[in-house]
Image (tube, helix red, strand yellow):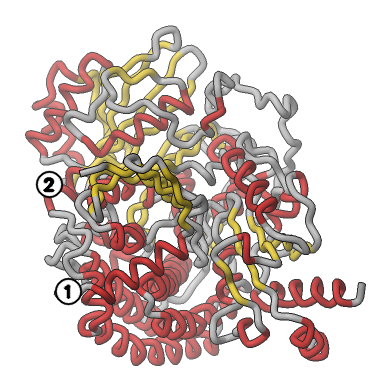
Amino acid sequence: MLDNLVKWSRVKSPWVLHFNSGSCNGCDIEILAALMPRLDAERFGVLLQGTPRHADVLVCTGPVTAQMKDRLIRIYEQMPEPKFVVVCGECGISGAVFDGCYNVEGGIDKVIPVNAYIPGCPPKPEAILDGVVKLLTALKEG
Amino acid sequence: MAEVRIPIGPQHPALKEPERFMITVEGETVVDADIKIGHIHRGIEKLAETKTYVQNQYLTERICGICSFTHTTNFCQVTEYVLGTDPPPRGLYLRTLVNELERIHSHLLWLGVAGHEMGFDTLFMYSWDDREIVQDILEHLTGNRVNYAYNCVGGVRRDITDAQKQMIIRGMDALLERMDYYVKVALNEKTILKRTQGVGILTTEDAKRLCAVGPRLRASNVKVDVRKDDPYAAYGELPFEVITSDTLDVHAQVVVRALETVESIKMCKYMMQNLPAGEIRVKVPKKVGPGEATSHTEAPRGEDIHHLRANGTDKPERLKVRAPTLANILNVQHTLKGANIADIPLVVAGIDPCMGCMDRVLIIDKDRETSKVWEKEELRKYSIEWYEGEPHR
Amino acid sequence: MTTQEMVQKLTGSLGAMVDSVESPKERRVYINTKRENLLGVVKHLKEQYGAYHISTITSFDNGDELELLYHVFIDTTFMSIRVKLPKSDPTVNTITPILPGAVLYEREISELMGVKVKGHPDMRLLLLPENWGNKGFPLRKDWVDPRRPEPPATEGGDA
């Protein structure tokens, strides 16, 4: 992992937009914990942005509820190219426990194209960082 | 003066769910506030009717990620009430222990987020780092940092070793020292005082009338806490104080939460020093009922209530859940009236909403017929700069 | 006052306004009444017993009738007021003039279970999306998700 991180930190520092499309917040607090002093993703250049227009990577959580579906699409369209989507947590992958609920679409890839999936309920902050690193390494290599 | 309506649903970099506010302002003052929720309405109550009681233990955990243990405690408790069984004392103590650990981590999380809202990012970093002490304990005890899968109908699933007990006592001692610093900061730090004193005042009468819950209610000087009024789990045997404050504003909420965290730490230590021996769970039948019961707990955010009706099968007939933030929405709408635009982030963060904000701030200037989109980050920075420019506060 | 004493006191003071008062457990009291008497019972609890906090309103679908449980918490006891409404006419009066905190819970039972609350100040959808239209009331037993007519198969699990 260390080699990947060193390589990645030379490539670029990704600006990340975090979007919650109906999640219970479990994944969201672990994403934030990845930025806190224990793991401190910011030393690798990962910066949390407030707007899609400045973001490279969209980190998305939650099963897509009916209310959030249009907003998710709008946010995705507002991001400039090249853009990548990372889905964090089981809910975003398949709907997890909420699959079948009347207000839930299912996985995030039913709504927007996804580049990477980080499984877990919720995934640990180390796993989240690992997932983002894997994505960026894969992109750098082609 | 011209009225301007602002829909706010900014994006919150720190967690949470989306919600939308429609704020009507005159100049800098909020005249009216309307809140639209439901962005994470998933339909859990309906789904719970198609799952067995065992599956529902895991479903209710995911109602909310921060107070997940409260929801499972409530669900297991209400099922135990219908069955008429009581978990053994050791199981109740362990359940109470994890409940209090969750309260500590939730309040520290909130302290950091509130600090971030004020521009006090150092507090954000410090409190989330100290929170890791609790997360480590939880991971040792239950296997996970969030969503512990520790509760079951009839007790808890894992026992605690002596080594873990010692680890918890050491962790609590370390946290108690850190809390000295946080309480001092909460009471004396100029940034916090400037941003929270006199902001978001909710009178005792209004708090009761609007059915506020949790620290918001206690910060309005109402001494109500489910753990004392309707003791559940092991709370009937634990010595602790219910913290209230009479300043009624957001600062009161900061102080109440900081002091509640200290109480929780002391309770955890007490439980480790007085843990009864014995079994941690009793076996319960797969089919429950018929019968019905109501159970409520004091989640970190306030009163959380579950009502269960069972029909004798292995699936519930009806499960009703009302999480605490829904009860606090009314008083947020009320306290926003008369606030400055710059106070909006803190008044909303004050109730510790288990919600986040997703949309944009769209400012519609009726006079000039123009509209401008504000991001939550912009609103947060605007409020920080507004306060830096304010001479008298 | 013990819960049993509370039950006796309530039965006495509420009189003809209620059908029965029962307590299956400590600190839990159920007051069964008819919908015409609902406001009277709530007012009585507020004026004589100091009630101000309504925790939530639970709704049930019992086939040909809807049942509502108003959970009012007073000091240390849950007083749950039960009313039953025929499905053919599921109307009930709003209690917001007496307990303003019930305003959001009445919106919730109206959109999810189809209870018509008379006199409510604001009947907009609370939790369901704005484009829900007339897809029905999701919490009713006979409601079927139009996207998925077959419910997902479930199997029991071990704890």
Residue annotated with mark 2: C1
Q: Which mark is residue B149?
A: none
Q: Can I make out residue B240 in this image?
A: no
Residue type (three-letter) at the residue carrying disc 1: Arg
Relative to B90, is B297 above or below?
Answer: above
The residue mark sitting in front, 1 or 2, is 1
Quadrant assignment, res B271: bottom left
Question: Between B3 and B201, which is closer to the camera in this rendering?
Answer: B3
Q: Residue at image x 74%, y 42%?
A: C155
Which chain is indicated by disc 1?
B
| Depth check, front residue: C155 or C66 | C66
| Helix, strand or loop under label 2 | loop
**Dot 1: element:** loop
* Residue B393 numbered mark, or none: 1
Q: Amino acid at mark 2?
A: Met
Q: Quadrant of the N terminus of chain B?
A: top left
As drawn, B160 above or below A64: below
Name of the residue lying farthest toward the top: C88
In which chain is the residue bearing label 2? C
Q: Is residue B384 above or below residue C15?
A: below
Query: Depth check: B390 or B93 in front?
Result: B390
- The x, y position of residue A50, in whole percent, is 54, 65
B315 and B387: which is toward the camera = B387
Q: In the rendered view of the protein, which quadrant contains the C terminus of chain B? A: bottom left
- Image quarter of residue B176: bottom left
